[in-house]
Amino acid sequence: MKPFPIPVVADLPMGPGSQIEEDTLDYMVMPSGMSTYQAPALPEREEIASLTGAHEALRLALASLDRARHGLPADPVDLMDLNDAERRLINQVLGEGEVSVRVSLSEGELVVQEAVFAGVWRVLHQVTQPGSDARVVLSDRIEVGRIPQGVLESAAARVQASGARRVRLQPEDTSAWPAGVMNAPAILTELEDHIHLWKPGTAAHVVNLTLLPLSPQDLAVIDQTLGQGPIQILSRGYGNCRIVHTEVPLTWRVSYFNSQDALILDTVEVTDLPEVACAAREDLEDSHERLADMLAWVEGA
């Protein structure tokens, strides 16, 4: 037998962890700590037995939720006539869920907070008094469904305002764009085409900016061209998802952040409303069961 050509040195450190790593891999932290349903903390039963206005509002909300889960129109529940104690009980029962929305209106704004029951929304229409920071609530209601009606109407108004005109995202003269712009023109042309072809029921067209070779100048041109429109949505699940209706009809900027608030996915969607902002039919079924249990506890006071 011939001798082994490579000498084996037995006293060298071997095995996992025995070698010195000069460079440490720096992995991006992925989203963690997913929000899950937690039953709201309620006061003692004897404290809420007399709050009949809140009981009735919750019964109406449950009836609306039953209609919504079967695909039927659901009426909003007006809370403006409740007293402070009844409103406090409503706040405790509904809690705060994953999605919040702000919609700028010609008069004031809509402030929307999803309840811990997905698909159940608390909707405030408020205005700021001239000359002060005081805010006056014009309406306070519970809405049930995929998304509050005011959000849909605001998004639809952008489409109606554009009429039959073809949306133009690129100027005739692009010479004013900064040097270094490479792929922004192609992306804007793609968005133009899909906005023009969109019809109700059309699946969302998604442009994943994270996967494309884009220069800082490209991103600056896209940001400036799309702008920021009247609707801002924050969805908290794994990390945060920020959804902004741009100044361009049917065009949304959907950005995903990890738990350190670092951007991990940046997209532009051409659609009437991104699905990530909406409650699903399964959510409504689950929320109906949970709210029914909660109402039974409240009314058993």
Image (tube, rainbow, N blue to C red):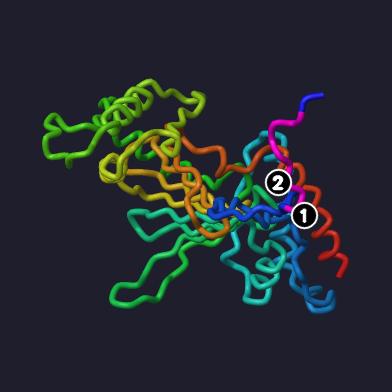
Q: Which residue is mark 1?
A: 291
Position in image of residue 6 (x %, y %): 69, 35
Magenta span: predominant SS is loop
Q: Badge 2, how many Cα within 10 Å: few under 14, some, many 20+?
A: many
Is 2 situated above or below 50?
above
Is 20 situated above or below 6?
below
Instruction: Identify the residue at horizontal 56%, vertical 51% (top origin).
Output: 25
Q: How many marks?
A: 2
Judged from the image, the secondary structure of the residue bearing numbered disc 2 is helix
Is 226 situated above or below 51?
above
Name the residue type under label 2. Answer: Leu
Query: Residue 164 or 41: which is nearer the viewer?
Result: 41
Position in image of residue 73 (x %, y %): 62, 38
Question: Range of the magenta residues?
Answer: 3-11
Q: Residue furthest top?
A: 197
Q: Quadrant of residue 284?
A: top right
Instruction: State yes or no: discs 1 and 2 in contact (Cβ < 8 Å).
Output: yes
* Residue 99 seen by the camera: no
Whether residue 75 is in magenta: the answer is: no
Is 204 situated above or below 61?
above
Query: Residue 14 or 65: which is nearer the viewer?
Result: 14
Name the residue type under label 1. Answer: Leu
Q: Is residue 145 left or right of residue 183?
A: right
Mark 1 vs mark 2, CA separation in Å = 9 Å
Q: Quadrant of residue 41?
A: bottom right
Instruction: Identify the residue at horizontal 38%, vertical 20% (top origin).
Output: 197
Q: Which mark is residue 65?
A: 2
